[in-house]
Image (spheres, rainbow, N blue to C red):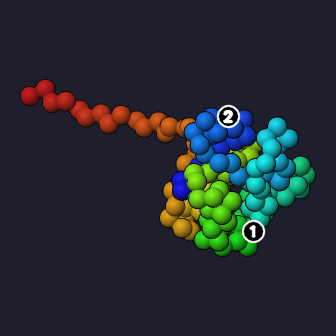
């Protein structure tokens, strides 16, 4: 089982690739039926709709993750995905600030499981070497 992150707008590509979706947002999209939701790692309504500052959001989300066991979260993901490749999804596009990236980093740091954004290829700078004139 490979774990990715992604966003709901990418649902068609995920389906074509055979990647199951799990909702890690507080609200499930109406245009995608039947996807499981992990409320235990979702931000709260206050965090997404209230007068929550960026710093406060980070502190509150850290508390949510601190109340979880990363290995149990991975077992939950495996159970919900049926052991198939899965994407932890919410609404924000890649590159936007989003809790799913914090969640992915937390899982990686606590379990060693590498999680990447589905369909995004990291640009790597070419390795230039100074040529010798002699």
Taking the spot 91% from the left edge, 52% from the top edge, the residue there is 50
* Position above or below: 45 against 109: above
Q: Position of residue 104 (x, y in %)?
A: 61, 56
Q: Residues within 10 Å of mark 2 (few under 14, many from 20)?
A: few
Where is residue 60, by image quadrant?
bottom right
Does residue 67 appear left or right of residue 102 in this picture?
A: right
**Residue 63 bears which disc, if any?**
1
Relative depth, front residue between 42 and 125: 42
Where is residue 133, by image quadrant?
top left
* Position above or below: 98 against 46: above
Does residue 87 appear left or right of residue 23 in this picture?
A: left
Which residue is situated farthest in the front direction here? 82
Q: Position of residue 86 (x, y in %)?
A: 61, 51
Q: Is residue 122 visible from the viewing direction of this image?
A: yes
Residue assigned mark 2: 12
Does residue 55 appear left or right of residue 17 in this picture?
A: right
Relative depth, front residue between 25 and 79: 79
Q: Position of residue 118 (x, y in %)?
A: 58, 42
Q: Is residue 106 visible from the viewing direction of this image?
A: no
- Nearer to us of marks 2 and 1 is 2
- CB atoms of marks 2 and 1 within 8 Å: no
* Position above or below: 128 against 43: above
Q: Specify the quadrant that holds the N terminus.
A: bottom right
């Amino acid at each position: 089982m490979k774990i990715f992150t992604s966003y709901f707008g990418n649902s068609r590509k995920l389906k074509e690739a055979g990647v199951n979706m799990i909702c890690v947002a507080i609200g499930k999209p109406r245009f995608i039926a039947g996807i499981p939701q992990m409320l235990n790692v979702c931000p709260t309504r206050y965090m997404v709709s209230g007068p929550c500052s960026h710093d406060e959001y980070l502190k509150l989300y850290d508390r949510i993750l601190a109340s979880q066991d990363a290995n149990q979260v991975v077992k939950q993901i495996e159970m919900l995905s049926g052991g198939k490749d899965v994407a932890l999804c919410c609404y924000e596009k890649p590159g936007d600030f989003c809790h799913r990236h914090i969640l992915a980093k937390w899982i990686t740091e606590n379990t060693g499981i590498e999680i990447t954004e589905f369909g995004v290829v990291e640009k790597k700078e070419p390795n230039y070497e100074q040529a010798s004139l002699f």
